[in-house]
């Protein structure tokens, strides 16, 4: 039995396909269309899924859509009508967009796939999120917590997963939303909503949470984990252009100019920003205030999530927790949930945001609607496209770069480890690309984390990004506790998906300067030999050469571009950046002769 899951028309469109309940393939549309956060109908991702399954659209048994468009439209109508005439612009925009495409999604799917409309099923948004976590987890029974901006009406839910059902018992409804609260601060701090949230999280350690009391005025949290927003501080409920209100500005002062350079006394002024401005001290002090605000909203978000996680576990009578929704990508909060909420086992799958809801919808149909037993556990994130050695050879041959083909994997791993240990920055393109926003050793840029200068080197030559955005350490699982003080969290699933921030051990901080954040934490990825044999072996060999079995890992893309998929895209990125070498399967490209 084949079930295709689809998520689209909001952000990060994606498709996933199951065969008899086991995942065969899953990918975000942006990897094929090359449009970052592409939200359109995911025709290319769907075709990729069908090709992986070796079937045509009409052979599908079911198609599962990740939300209920009519219920969502009803919410938009109800909330905008309640606010007329303030909301006239939202209303116009919604009517146009929904009538043009979103409401007719069933027709669109039928046309694209040639499937009987009765076999197209719509799953509630948060049920899709919940299913994406619980049905991929190894747990027979677990509490469930989903938190995002908004689905149809729900913005957060708690409930329980048992065997082949997820039962969401408590919901918070729009406009009360922890995700939209965080997004309001994201916009206020000068970043793009739905894109810059992780930048707020990155800025937070540069600040002190001295505005926590002010932030708490915006949000009332009850001990049972329910919450409400103080709506006078927000405008997202009736504006298409502004998320926070004048009262918000009165409380926190002027917003930070969009995408202005961020630096503080602690971060310093990186060389790739250009010349230091004459009013450096004044700008650093202003930025410090914004960093303090980032620290404050992050602290309040963490506290709220801790309360919700505790309440969810208490009600479900278990210490095992599954989380999903965009807010579950807050890796600092996830680390605290494991340390402080009494959670013994935490599961989050790598595409915890809306793209992952495509998979959740498909799993919901298979287990909960059709009642089939479970058997699948998501052990790794590599569900995307792979490329043959022939394709790689052809792409490499078409360039002017010196190309070297290793006779076997053993030789390739030795060469790649040598390059990293020698201080080179390499592109690493291996196997199937990752599901979700993180590069986890299949489409990664890798370097030696022992070299403090690597952070600047990679930023100057390749990433051109803000100094507060940390690079992640990938560590072999058996050595994780030597470098990170995780109290066992390194063995949890979120650690292998780079979804936990944990303290770096005091003795390891000077060993890993390029991946240790200013507050002595790191967003680590633990790498296991079973699910990721090649990447595990590479890091092991780097460890043999350097004494430290850790590599610095960042996603293989240039600023503003989706992570690379094909060898040709990897080569293009290699050519346009300061990468020293590119390793694709057993082929290595070098720049040294240019
Ligand atoms: Fe969502």
Image: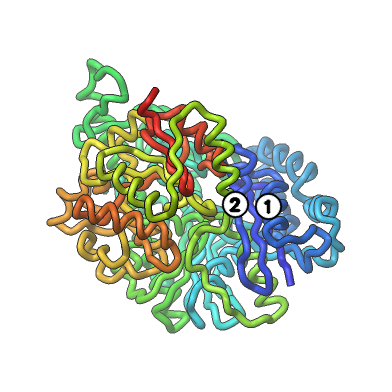
Above or below, 243 against 402 in this view is below
Count neighbours of disc 2 (C-alpha within 10 A) and say few if under 14, some if 14 to 19, many if 20 or more.
many
In front: 117, or 145?
117
N-term-proximal mark, 2 vs 1: 1
User: How many numbered marks are there?
Assistant: 2
Left or right: residue 517 compared with residue 369: left
Q: Position of residue 463 (x, y in %)?
A: 39, 34
Does any atom of ligand 1 lie closer than 8 Å to the CB of label 1?
no
Q: Which residue is mark 2?
A: 385
Tell me which residue sits at (60%, 46%) in the image.
Answer: 11
Real-space Cα distance between discs 2 and 1?
Answer: 8 Å
Disc 1 on helix, strand or loop? helix
Instruction: Left or right? Give the position of 435 relative to 494.
Output: right
Q: Does 347 appear above or below 185?
A: below
Residue displayed at 37% across by 61% down = 527
Q: Image point 66% across, 67% down: which residue?
A: 18
* Quarter that holds the C terminus: top left
**Vertical arrangement, residue 336 with respect to residue 449, above or below:** below
Where residue 255 appears, x then y in whole percent? Answer: 40, 32
**Quarter occupied by the N terminus:** bottom right
Q: Which residue carries the number 1 mark?
A: 48
Whether tag 2 and tag 1 are in contact, CB under 8 A, the answer is yes
Return the residue found at the far top: 278
């Amino acid at each position: 039995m084949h079930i295709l899951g689809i998520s689209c028309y909001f952000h990060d469109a994606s498709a996933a396909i199951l065969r008899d309940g086991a995942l065969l393939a899953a990918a975000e549309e942006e990897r094929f269309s090359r449009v970052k956060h592409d939200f359109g109908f995911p025709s290319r991702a769907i075709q990729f899924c069908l090709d992986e399954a070796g079937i045509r659209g009409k052979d599908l048994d079911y198609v599962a859509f990740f939300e209920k468009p009519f219920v969502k439209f009803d919410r938009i109508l109800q909330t905008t009508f309640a606010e007329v005439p303030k909301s006239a612009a939202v209303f116009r925009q919604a009517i146009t967009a929904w009538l043009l495409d979103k409401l007719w999604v069933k027709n669109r799917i039928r046309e694209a796939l040639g499937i009987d409309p009765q076999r197209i099923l719509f799953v509630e948004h948060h049920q899709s999120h919940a299913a994406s976590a619980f049905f991929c987890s190894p747990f027979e029974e677990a509490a469930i917590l989903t938190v995002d901006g908004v689905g149809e009406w729900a913005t957060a839910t708690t409930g329980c997963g048992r065997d082949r059902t997820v039962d969401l018992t408590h919901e918070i409804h729009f406009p009360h939303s922890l995700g939209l609260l965080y997004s309001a601060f994201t916009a206020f701090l000068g970043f793009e909503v739905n894109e810059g949230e992780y930048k707020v999280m990155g800025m937070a350690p540069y600040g002190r949470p001295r505005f926590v009391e002010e932030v708490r005025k915006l949000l009332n949290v009850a001990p049972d984990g329910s919450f409400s927003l103080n709506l006078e501080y927000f405008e997202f409920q009736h504006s298409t252009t502004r998320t926070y209100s004048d009262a918000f500005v009165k409380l926190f002062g002027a917003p930070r100019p969009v995408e202005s350079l961020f630096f503080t006394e602690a971060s310093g002024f990186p060389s790739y920003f250009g010349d230091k401005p004459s009013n450096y001290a004044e700008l650093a002090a202003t930025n410090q205030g914004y960093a303090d605000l980032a620290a404050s909203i992050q602290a309040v978000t963490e506290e709220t999530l801790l309360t919700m996680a505790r309440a969810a576990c208490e009600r479900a009578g278990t210490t095992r927790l599954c989380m999903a929704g965009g807010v579950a990508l807050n890796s600092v909060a996830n680390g605290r949930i494991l340390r402080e909420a009494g959670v013994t086992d935490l599961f989050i799958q790598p595409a915890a945001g809306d793209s992952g809801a495509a998979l959740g919808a498909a799993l919901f149909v298979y287990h909960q609607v059709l009642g089939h037993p479970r058997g699948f556990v998501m052990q790794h994130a590599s569900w995307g496209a792979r490329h043959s050695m022939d394709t790689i050879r052809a792409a490499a041959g078409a360039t002017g770069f010196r190309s070297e083909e290793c006779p076997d994997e053993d030789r390739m791993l030795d060469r790649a480890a040598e390059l990293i240990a020698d201080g080179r920055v390499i592109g690493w393109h291996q196997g199937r690309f990752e599901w979700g926003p993180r590069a986890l050793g299949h489409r990664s840029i890798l370097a030696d984390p022992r070299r403090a200068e690597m952070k600047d080197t990679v930023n100057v030559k390749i990433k051109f990004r803000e100094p507060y955005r940390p690079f992640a350490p990938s560590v072999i699982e058996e050595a994780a506790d030597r470098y990170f003080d995780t109290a066992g969290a390194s063995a949890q699933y979120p650690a292998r998906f780079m979804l936990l921030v944990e303290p770096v051990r005091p003795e390891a901080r000077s060993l890993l300067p390029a991946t240790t954040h200013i507050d002595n934490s790191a967003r680590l990825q633990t790498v296991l030999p079973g699910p990721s044999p090649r990447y595990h072996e590479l890091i092991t060999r780097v460890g043999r050469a350097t004494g430290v079995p850790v590599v610095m890992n960042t996603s293989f893309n240039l600023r503003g571009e989706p992570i690379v998929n094909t060898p040709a895209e990897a080569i293009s990125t290699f050519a346009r950046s300061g990468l020293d070498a590119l390793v694709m399967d057993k082929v290595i490209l070098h720049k040294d002769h240019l």
